[in-house]
Amino acid sequence: MPMTPHDVSQASEAICRLAPVIPVLVVDDPAHARPLAQALVAGGLPALEVTLRTPAALEVIAEMARVEGGTVGAGTLLTPDDITRAVEAGARFGVSPGATDRLLDAAEDADLPLLPGAATATEAMRLLERGYTVQKFFPAEASGGAPALKAIGAPLPQIRFCPTGGVSPSNVGVYLGLANTLCVGGSWVAPADKMRAGDWDAITALAREASRLPRG
């Protein structure tokens, strides 16, 4: 039987609890996939979101899926076809900027844990009504940041979030301090210049620092 929204939320929560930060990765060169994943896992960040924003993304997911200790997922899922291709590539979870019934149906049918995006109380309530108690808050900073997420949590304490979009070293502590934040998604742990230079030690150091961030 397909996963239920309750099943999806439980699996998503387990992934979110692996570390305080899920790296949000935009990778152009498949040759960077394995060493990047190894560097992030070595630094204590095992859950990796590869966004489907580059032609290489599916190949990158396939390479990262082979890295021991890693849990690779696909981000920027927009259509059922995206979900099919991501699962075939080896993605073990998915992340979407928003949520449609077709996308949710496809993720459940594919047994893919999904973090569906919500930016407002109404969107969060619609997902909750379907059974999704773990969601992505996106775009976090543009939607009011940590104060908005805290305000949403007051009447909807049963929902836990992974805020993404504008989360950085300067504000990550505020997000992680919220009672309704499970983890955050951020790109700062894998800077493009460090990837291009192959400075995997620097990325491991950034990951290690992020992995030690306290959660509320």
Image: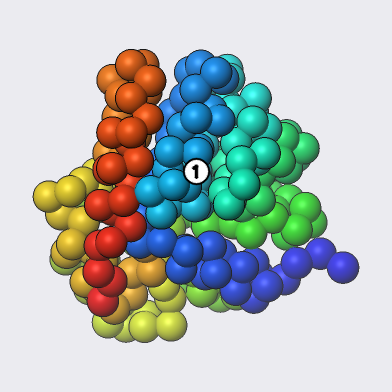
Whether residue 9 is visible to the viewer of this picture, yes or no, is no
Quadrant of residue 191 within the rendered picture: top left
Residue at x-position 81% and y-position 64%: 2
Report which residue position mark 1 lands on.
49
Residue closest to the far left: 170
Residue at x-position 44% and y-position 47%: 42
The percent coordinates of residue 10 (x first, y second) are 60, 73
The percent coordinates of residue 12 (x first, y second) are 56, 64
Nearer-the-camera pick, 200 or 130: 200
Q: How is the image coloured?
A: rainbow
Whether residue 91 is visible to the viewer of this picture, yes or no, is yes
Q: Mark 1 Cα within 10 Å, few/some/many (few <14, many 20+)? A: many
Residue at x-position 36% and y-position 83%: 157
40 vs 210: above or below: above
Left or right side of 157 for 63: right
Nearer-the-camera pick, 95 or 170: 170
Q: Quadrant of the C terminus?
A: bottom left
Report the label total.
Answer: 1
Nearer-the-camera pick, 12 or 32: 32
205 vs 31: above or below: below
Residue closest to the far right: 1
The percent coordinates of residue 181 (x first, y second) are 33, 69
174 vs 90: above or below: below
Q: Quadrant of the N terminus?
A: bottom right
User: What amino acid type is highlighted by mark number 1?
Assistant: Glu
The percent coordinates of residue 34 (x first, y second) are 55, 30
Helix, strand or loop for disc 1: strand
